[in-house]
Amino acid sequence: MTNASWQPDPSGQFELRYWDGTAWTEHVSTQGVQSTSPYDPAAAPAPVPPSTDAFAGLSGELVDGTYTEVEGTGPQKQNDRLLRVRIEEPFLAKQGAMVAYQGAVDFAYQGGGVAKFIKKSLTGERLSLMQVSGTGDVFLADDAKHVHILKLTNSGLSVSGGSVLAFSASLDWNVERVRGGSMAAGGLFNTSLRGTGWVAITTDGLPVVLNASEAPTFADANALVAWSINLQTHIKSSVTAGALIGRGSGEAFQVAFTGQGFVIVQPSEGPPPAPKG
């Protein structure tokens, strides 16, 4: 600024102040009315720092706190279809389930050993895992399915591999044949979880939880999500019912349950079978 001219008043007290080419003068003007006021550099207001509000200048439900991250340690439901895990110790999660994370987080393939690999290959049980460790928050989801958290205390659960979202690394897991089933029945292998820890499972729609001790309980193998590991199971075939019971490839198999425990069933039998031809 070298030429003499009217300029915005740096003190903020008036609209304009006259710059004589070398210094600010006492001549000021506001809305065209001129007056005099000595210029005091110390009276100039401090510069306003940039806003630290990440949502400054924005409004609406996406920025009003409705969808703010849920607080808490360990596994927490961010909403009905999204799991947030604040890492306290390593845990296992379905490969490809991570949708976002914050912090220094490491992801590593979790094979489970040769025996489990062979079992998964032979049975078709869908359980491909990654180990998650480090510090921070990890957000997990699976095709916008509903998320449910269960805590095990010296207990066990049998879960369809396709319904496993994440679980504590402290839990022992294995691929096991459903008791009473055979290889010929198909799809009758589940993932067992035993010990103390947490597990997050998903359901395609809102599930129903049945008390198997109340009455003989039967469920379509494709709609089964999980059940108490102590329940007795056997396979019931409704060949004569064919196309009427469940969705399958012509023969209908249900899993029968007896004993003290619960059975979780989802309102979906998976995608429809591919058309033949």
Image (spheres, rainbow, N blue to C red):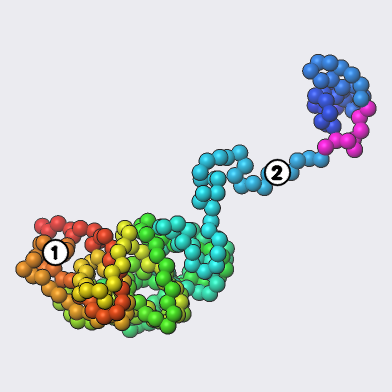
Element at badge 2? loop
Q: Is residue 255 magenta?
A: no
Q: Position of residue 59 (x, y in %)?
A: 56, 40
Which residue is rendered at x = 21% and y = 69% of the image? 219
Q: Position of residue 41 (x, y in %)?
A: 90, 35
- Name the foreground residue: 201 vs 135: 201
Amino acid type at circle 1 is Ile
Which mark's residue is nearer the viewer, 2 or 1? 1
- Name the foreground residue: 211 vs 257: 211
What residue would you read off at disc 2? 50
| Residue 121 seen from this side | no
Q: Using a 10 Å C-alpha cutoff, classify the residue at mark 2 as few (fewer than 14 neighbours), some (14 to 19) or many (20 or more).
A: few
Element at badge 1? loop
Q: Position of residue 1 (x, y in %)?
A: 83, 29
What residue would you read off at disc 1? 245
Q: Is residue 123 left or right of residue 251?
A: right
Quarter containing the C terminus: bottom left
- Name the foreground residue: 222 vs 26: 222
The kind of secondary structure the magenta stretch mainly shows is: loop
Q: Position of residue 42 (x, y in %)?
A: 90, 38
